[in-house]
Amino acid sequence: MPMALTCFILTPNLKERVKTMIDLPLRLRRLRRTENLRRLIRETELQTNDFIYPLFVKEGLDKRQAISSMPGQFQLCLGDLKQEVKEIESLGIPAVIVFGIPQNKDERGSESFHPHGIVQQAIREIKKHSQTLLVISDICFCEYTDHGHCGMLQGKEVDNDGTLELLGKQAVAHAEAGADILAPSGMMDGMVQAIRTALDKSNFSHLPILSYAVKYASCFYGPFRDAAEGTPQFGDRKGYQMDPANGQEALREAMLDMREGADMLMVKPAMNYLDIIYRVKQQNPSIPLCAYQVSGEYSMIKNAASHGLLDEEQAMFESLTAIKRAGSDFIITYFAKEVCKGILQAHP
Ligand code: PBG
């Protein structure tokens, strides 16, 4: 008798497997028969606690303006914030992330650290209407510079170390306005350490940093650049944001930012990078991990749904559930209000 066949017959494990295949005692469909059975064994459940809603506040507007590339999203004026805050709180959303769009942009993005810059005004206005809603501020320069890059230029290059000093200044200005969490998104080397040092020197050692540690040079930010008006006037961001082809490098980025003192990490975008979310979480299970479902992910679903290609509500829940299942603890998404409405309807 040939060797392989002898093993097949003699191994008890294999015997059992063959028997299982014949009798089918294990039928996984038994646990999928009714909605309550499915609820009982569900491994991932979205909660209103999981979401952060992005707000765009533009200087010089007197009423909200629809963002054409992002159906259902608006550039807001300061006067809109009271109503927004009420709605966001009533939906149980714990945090917002604020992006400011100034009227005047310059080479150094000075509106980002001016005490009366639009983002500082927006933070103060939100805090006036709620003490408890967490305000995260995006610390970057692309919305504030006339060239649209995420830092200071030296020739045609973004000057890393020159930018660090101004990042610290910007973070302190946002903290003074009342920001609860600072979220550096410019992918400068050393940005977390520079911001931590600047905050600590200015008596803000209690404020956490949520680092956009793993941010890819993605075309899925396309619609956001309309919303925040921060398109680079020349070149691209590949010299500082990560190459979508790289996975191991994400683990180095995460490790470095933790060492520099990041309190929470972020992976961005989300849907094309579920493997990265999974790997960063597996490598660093103890640090809270955020994922950003970016503008392009949102607009794709919205547009496909408006053309009748897929069900919007289901696509929203499925995409967000997948992002959480991959390992993120919370999610920044333009769907935050809609998904929380859906959650509250299902579990009033
Ligand atoms: C940089 C920043 C960007 C996004 C968030 N913060 C743009 C970029 O890096 O090009 C993109 C978010 C989105 O697409 O929803 N300030």
Image: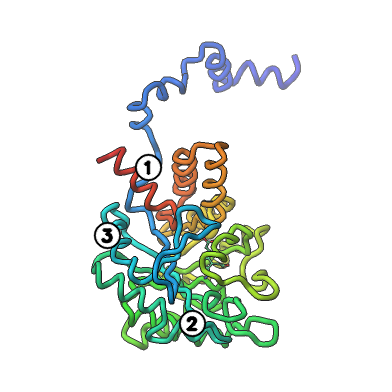
Vertical relation: 255 (above or below) 103: above
Residue at 76 percent across and 17 percent down: it is: 2
How far apart are the alpha carbons under marks 1 and 3? 25 Å
Q: Position of residue 162 (x, y in %)?
A: 57, 88
Q: Quadrant of residue 168?
A: bottom left
**Residue position marked by numbered label 1 in the rendering:** 45
- Name the residue nearer the viewer: 78 or 109: 78
Give the mark toward the camera: 3 or 2.
3
Label 3 sits on residue? 86
Amino acid type of the residue that numbered disc 3 sits on in the rendered structure = Lys
Residue in view at x 33 percent, y 31 percent: 40
Name which residue lies at 34% across and 87% down. 202
Q: Look at the numbered discs 1 and 2 and tell me whether their residues touch, using CB distance below 8 Å.
A: no
Which coloring applies here?
Answer: rainbow
Residue 85 x %, y %:
30, 62
Q: Earlier in the sequence, mark 1 or mark 3?
A: 1
Q: Is residue 31 left or right of residue 295?
A: left
Q: Earlier in the sequence, mark 1 or mark 2?
A: 1
- The residue positioned 43% from the left and 76% from the top of the image is 60
Residue tagged 2: 167
Q: Which mark lies nearer to you, 1 or 3?
A: 3
